[in-house]
Structures are given as structure tokens and as C-alpha cells.
Amino acid sequence: MKFFSQLRRPTGLVRGIPRGVFLLLPLLATALGCLLILPDDDTITILSWNIENLFDAVDQGTEYHQFTSAGGWTEGDYHRRKERIAQAILALRPRPDIFIFLEIENREVLDALMDRHLVDIHAPYRVFASGPGAAIGIGVASRYPIRDARTHLARAGDFPPLRPVVETRFDLAGRDLVVFSNHWKSKRGGAPATEPLRRASAQLLAARMEELHRAEPDLPLLVAGDFNERPLEFELTGRSYPTALMPARELIALAGALAAGAEDLPSWVTPEWLREGDHLIWESSAGEAILGSSRLERPVLVNLWDDTDAPGSFYFINRWERIDSMFLSPSLFLPGSDLRFSAFAVPCPRDGCDSRGRPLSWEDDPRGVSDHLPLLLTLVRSP
């Protein structure tokens, strides 16, 4: 299957800033290089959360039927959903500085959530992006300035454009961080059958990461979102087909077996497949990631799930799933870095879990918030 991608600008860059500030930002950026926001302390916390279909009450023609007036969706339903999400966020500690929301309908919904329900949180820098004609998209809000934002659209064969990968570059008081927000294709239709679509998103992401790495080798990266597959997908599916998330050790082992002329390798294990980059590569520690990157000659990220005992973020058919993930550049774990990893958590939001700690979907229970748990990353700046 042939993969390719398109690049387009997201809508609503720095949306929600007072008009005077919005107009001055380009001038300030030109004159001063950037607009600095000094942190209250030395920590920066980033939330990534699939908030499960947050739709407004305006029929626009792209909604799922249950979120239209004909389907019974009302303004009151919309208001209650925002309130539930806001209450859950306000109870989080530490409180986020940067928000990544998946399954949000449009920019106006993002603004309404932040400006009317999270009024105690100052996050005026915003981005929203979705695919052409899509019902849902990705919203980003931040208290730190957004220096650049791009929407990358992957395509695979004759399929319509996939959900976007949103690239956002933040100015964290003088230190850049690039965040890639993702919501990859679900397994609806079967995991093997839909895997090429997730691999298309991974290939797009890997190519952009390599481009950034060549231009700025020390630039820290965060890749976050709902990937609709587990980091260990390749192993857990019996290594029977290539997956979009791949441990570096698996690729190194396959490359070694191929070089040694092993005869029992699957037909898809070829030098071209190992080089083409249709997978996001990860390892469990910074040291392993650096070694893997050297051997594979490609960026390798650190999988944050290996830093927690949390069983997962999504519970499906009596099983925990780690389909929501965060991956970090290994440089963020090295001593002496001016921006470093501090903590990773999968908290149970207020009223968002049942008695067993499983996410409580609002569609299944009016007391619930989302069928996913949030991911919370804390970075620390050197003084």
C-alpha cells in the first residue's frame, strides 16, 4: 500500500487571545524573537486526553447522528458534558499548563470549554485541526506561547485522508518543545485490516521527526495521543504482521536475522521495510533509546508506560489497554538538560472512574466523564 502525506495549517492558531494581543504577537516575535511567559515554578505539566465525543448543539452536517437535534442531542446535554470535563480537569494535581484534547468537534467547542468552564486556567494560545469533513478533531490549548503549528494529513492508498497529526512548537520560557498530537485509526474493521492506516500515520510522523532531528538535533519532542494500539502491539499479536508502534529491539533483531540469511522470516521483513519508516520506534529507557537510534540510524523515543504501574488508560471487553501513550526524546532524561522528565501519571479524574478504577464513560453512566483516562506528564526546567 502506498503511503503519502499532506501538510496544511491548522485553524485557530493562538485562538482566543484578546484581539490586541493577537495582532501584536507577530510584531513582538519579529522584534524580540519570541514572547516569553515566565513559569510560576520550575514545572510544566501536559495533559493528553481523549474526552469522548464532545459535540456542541449546532447541527453542521458532519456530526455523528446521536449528536444531532434529530438524534436527541440538546444544548443542556452539551453544557453538562463540558461541566463534567471541566470539573475533572480542575481536580487534577498538578494542574496542566498545556492541554491536548482528542474527539472534540471544532474550535468553538474548544474555546467554550476553556473560556466558560475552565475560567481559572489561563491558556489563551490555541490550535484546532481536523480532517476534511471529519466529525471530530484535535484541540490544543496552552498557557505558553505557540511559536508554530502545522497539521499533517496522512493518506494510505485510496482511503480518504486520515485523522491529522498536529505539530505544535511551544516556547517554554525560552526553551522550545515540539509536541505531536495524534489520534490514529481505530481497529474497527479488524486489527490486521486497519493496521496499514495506523502505519501511514506513523510513517508521516517518523518522516517529520527525522526532518526535525536533522535540522535541530537537540530539539526535545513529545509524541502523545490515542494511537489505538499498544506499544507492545507487535509482540502481543504474535509478530504476525508489521505494526505502527515498534520497539527498537524488535527491529534490531529482525535486521540481524535478515543479515544472517534467516530463512524463517516473514516475507514482509525486507531491507526496504526496515528503512522506510512506517513505524514509530520506541524503547523503555533513554539509554536503550540512544543505543537503538545509533544502530537503526533513526530517532527512537522513550515509552512512558514503562515508568508507571498503571494497567492502562482504556478498558475494553474485560481488558485494560494502553492505547493512549506518551513518547519522549531521550535527551529529556539526561542529567544536565535544561528541560527534563519529572513524572508521568494516569490519574482517575474526579467522578471519572468506577469502584475498580476503570474509566467511566458518560455514555454508559451519566456520572461518567470519558471512556479514556487522561495522561499527565510533568517536565522540570533547570533554574
Image (cartoon, helix red, strand yellow):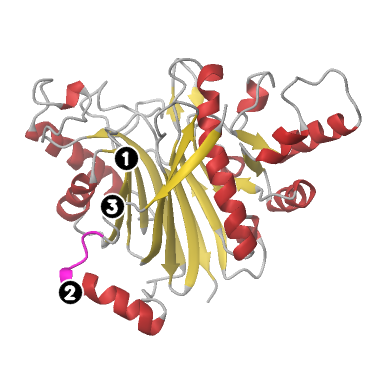
Point out the tag, 1 or 3, that comes first from the N-terminus: 3
Residue under the image location 39 percent in, 57 percent down: 149
Point out the tag, 3 or 2, that comes first from the N-terminus: 3
Please say if the residues under marks 1 and 3 sit with CB atoms less than 8 Å apart.
no
| Numbered circle sitting on residue 36 | none
Query: Spatial distance from mark 3 to mark 2, Cα to Cα?
Result: 19 Å
Is there any visible trace of residue 62 in the rendered image?
yes
Helix, strand or loop for disc 1? strand
Query: Spatial distance from mark 1 to mark 3, Cα to Cα?
Result: 11 Å
Mark 3, residue position = 11
At label 1, the amino acid type is Gly
At label 2, the amino acid type is Gly
Q: Is residue 284 above or below residue 218?
A: above
Q: Residue furthest right?
A: 260
Q: Is residue 350 magenta?
A: no
Residue 2 horizontal/vertical position (percent) = 56, 31
Judge by depth and name the residue closer to the eye, 378 or 18: 18
Rate crowding at label 2 as few (under 14), some (14 to 19) or many (20 or more) other CA atoms within 10 Å.
Answer: few
| Numbered circle sitting on residue 20 | 2
Q: Is residue 16 magenta?
A: yes
Rate crowding at label 3 as few (under 14), some (14 to 19) or many (20 or more) other CA atoms within 10 Å.
Answer: some
- Magenta range is 15-20
Q: Main secondary structure of the magenta part?
A: loop
Point out the tag, 1 or 2, that comes first from the N-terminus: 2
Residue under the image location 61 percent in, 36 percent down: 278
Please say if the residues under marks 3 and 2 sit with CB atoms less than 8 Å apart.
no
Residue 212 horizontal/vertical position (percent) = 57, 59
At label 3, the amino acid type is Thr
Mark 1, residue position = 137
Judge by depth and name the residue closer to the eye, 190 or 363: 190
Query: Spatial distance from mark 1 to mark 2, Cα to Cα?
Result: 28 Å
- 54 left or right of 42? left
